[in-house]
Amino acid sequence: MGYVLGFGQFGATNIADVGGKGARLAELSRLDGVRVPDGFCVTTDAFRQVVAEAPAVAARLGPLARAGAGDPEAIRALSADIREAVESVDLPAELVAAIGESLARIGEDVPCAVRSSATAEDLPDASFAGQQDSFLNVVGLEEILRHVRLCWASLFSERAVTYRRRNGFEDRKVRMGVVVQRMVAADAAGVLFTADPVTSNRKVAAVEAVRGLGEALVSGRAAGEVHAVRDDRIVTRPDVARPVLTDEQVVRLVRLGRRIEAHFGQPQDIEWCLADDEFQIVQSRPITTLFPIPSVDDGENHVYLSVGHQQMMTDAIRPLGLSLWQLTTPRPMAEAGGRLFVDVTAILAKPAGREGFLTTMERSDPLMRDALQTVLDRDGFLRTLPDEPPTSAPTPAPKPAPASASASAGAAPVQEEPDPAIVEQLIRENRESVDALRREIREPTGTALLDLIMADVEELRRLLFDRRGHRTFMAAMEATWWLNDRLAEWLGETNAADALAQSVPHNVTSEMGLALLDVADAVRPHADVVAFLRRVADEDRAGDDAGDGFLDEMARLPGGPEARDALRAYLDAYGMRCAGEIDVTRTRWSERPAMLVPAILGHIANFAPGESRRRFERGLQESRQKEREVLERLRALPDGERKAAETKRMIDRVRAYSGYREYPKYGMVSRYFLYKQALLREAGRLVGEGVLQAKDDIFYLRMEELRDVVRTGEADADLIRERREAFRSYEALTPPRVLTSDGEALTGRYRRDDVPPGALVGLPVSAGTVEGRARVVTDMARADLAPGDILVTTSTDPSWTPLFVTAAGLVTEVGGLMTHGAVIAREYGLPAVVGVDGATRLIRDGQRIRVDGTAGHVELLP
């Protein structure tokens, strides 16, 4: 397209030719009522010929490509070397002439802005804001040429290279255009966000304004006056005598921003300036940090709860995983940002159901409850609907007795006593059903396989939502609440049930953590095997995924067969598990056993042989001792024999039934892994026939779409590619606990004043207090815990259980009273606080902290 183009010669589709910023400015200049300062763009073709193909630069790009995001020193040195080469490159005469000719049309002595415009910039899913350089008040051809080189060189700044690494962009595939634009003698300037950047509310626009040029504001050197506008009405204005913008100007600017937003089809981050009471737009980019909104077209307001926060898995899920989870669950779920949400609008709109729902949320996740209350307190957001008269006498939902009940009213929960033999029966039925599926799923292919899986999902649902199972773990939960309420009232004990729930039988997840200690016992005596596994762990950390091939190599070492057999037996029992296991597309332990090796090596280093038996027995004895102590104290009270008898019955319930709570999910992920193995075999066949390009293409298709591909032998490669790109953008987003149809993301607050100054507040889920070194862990496979360390992470699911064996306490950002981390922490007797907002950011790795799992806070120690 040539070396230089005027704004009128290209548009939004020319990102490859002029970069994201240039293409959007040209598009803006075409919109009625939108003024854009005059300018031109040095094209990416000029960059390619002058810079990318220059021998001095091309020779350095190879070493830079090999430097990963985890090697900042190499990136720093290599990128500096490339920048120096770019800044000294010779410009061809025809490029100099073309720039000079375009500059003459603006005016050679007119101050200009020279702005970087990379092809990976101002994109719908990655803005790259601030990653490349821009320069203001550049005057004269020679200075323009020098600053064009500086913009090119900024493509290889350390921050820009690192940003590309983290967002999956290759250095060689990114090109740089340069925008040269007449500077505006601005009376005021600033930024307009067409969606609130703090709350993400799409109906609230935020305007920041300063006098003069806005560069100080954009660069963060100065704070602007802030206005918030909703429906052409200013809802927040600066408290100053003479604001930078009048109310009329603010509303006019927001209307202009809404026009730009409508044209581009998504919320915009717009840089503007004001001269002679006229707004001019100097940049508009998509706001890429907003969490998407579930699609709904009924014109009503809606409130959504995050499923991921309840499942302790807030990561994005691929389409196959989303569709299978939706098929599994009993109620409809909305999708947004690669996550699932439950629409609770109807529950909140009806007074009869609302209070019980909010009470349940208060117990399980106070932050969600507070976020919901924030929405309910807003007049007019949700309509109140009349309660529907019952068509028949419904069975009331079981509710725990309130803590304020009188001592004489110590009645048992509504839930009737299940048969004590039911737990073993339910586990046996689930195991037999999974074994039957394992036999049946081996042979079918094509549509027969998809039909079998879809039919088996119904069997999975039957087992997951078996009313007998629900009665069983509800009996345990209600007994837990009863114990905590009554023993707090009668004995002043806080969360007394935690100590009484250690080492309960039939808890498949806690058994899984202890079983890995037995694997460590099988490995420990063999020095060659231990050394071999250290090498495997190092290679896995470096990204060398050996699958399960290392097991056979290990078997050739002295003691290797015993170690291999122990690990394979563990994988046979638990290999279907992994982090984020509700997503069927996630890599399972059986697919990459090296993920377990760091935990095995940690157990070898930190524990003596037989630790699993000692640990279980210790928890059992502590529980029994606590039971004796509680019952003895109760008998000394007025009416003590009755209180002790009722308490004993509730303790027996907790110990008999609470272990079963983990088993339905274990059965579910067992089936998911069988589905995945069969579907990947089918994907291999489709790749061999040329229908798919890669086996994991199936992860980006929904179950019904995959069935169509299998049936027709045709796949939409463009759709798969688009979904891959969308998933990558979703991975960078953090889902809110509560989301509204306005796009507002609410996290909730703990409204407490009973914590030490500076402490981080959370939900107490496992009683006790512990001090120790914080280990902030984001990847279980790379965890390095020693006894006494406190595990700090975003969230945990059953795959994290092996780390609980070593940890002395637990802190998570996500979680509730009955989520995985809470249940297993109580089972192992670890003090735990969950729902600590920002814990992995506010707590430094290695810092000493005190975790109070009884009161629910974390203190940062000197």
Image (spheres, grey):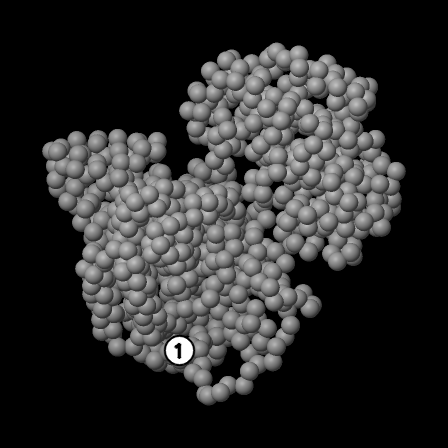
For badge 1, the amino acid type reads: Pro
Q: Is residue 759 above or below residue 180?
A: below
Q: Residue at x 21, y 43 (%)?
A: 520
* Disc 1 crowd, CA 10 A, few/some/many (<14, 14-19, 20+): some
Rendering quarter of residue 777: top left
Task: Please state the total of marks drawn on the protein image.
Answer: 1
Q: Give the vertical position of 854 relative to 850 (above or below).
A: below
| Nearer-the-camera pick, 101 or 38 | 101
Q: Quick check: 293 left or right of 846?
A: right
Residue 2 lies left or right of residue 551; in this view the side is: right
**Quarter residue 123 falls in:** top right
> In the rendered image, is residue 326 in sight?
yes
User: Along the line of sight, which residue is nearer the eye, 476 or 169?
Assistant: 169
* Residue nearer the viewer, 104 or 738: 104
Q: Position of residue 149 (x, y in %)?
A: 63, 18
Q: Choose between 573 and 259: the one closer to the eye.
A: 259
Residue 221 seen anywhere in this rendered image of the structure: no
Residue 820's spot in the image, x, y percent?
Answer: 38, 57
The image quadrant where one finds the N terminus is top right
Seen at 26% across and 30% down, the residue is 535
**Label 1 element class:** loop
Residue 9 position in % (x across, y down): 70, 32
| The image quarter in which residue 297 lies | bottom right
**Picture coordinates of residue 95 (x, y %)?**
66, 17
Pointer 1 residue: 413
Q: Residue at x 79, y 20 (%)?
A: 104
Q: Residue at x 67, y 34 (%)?
A: 10
Instruction: Work out whether 706 lies above or below 541.
Output: below
Give left or right: position of 769 versus 112: left
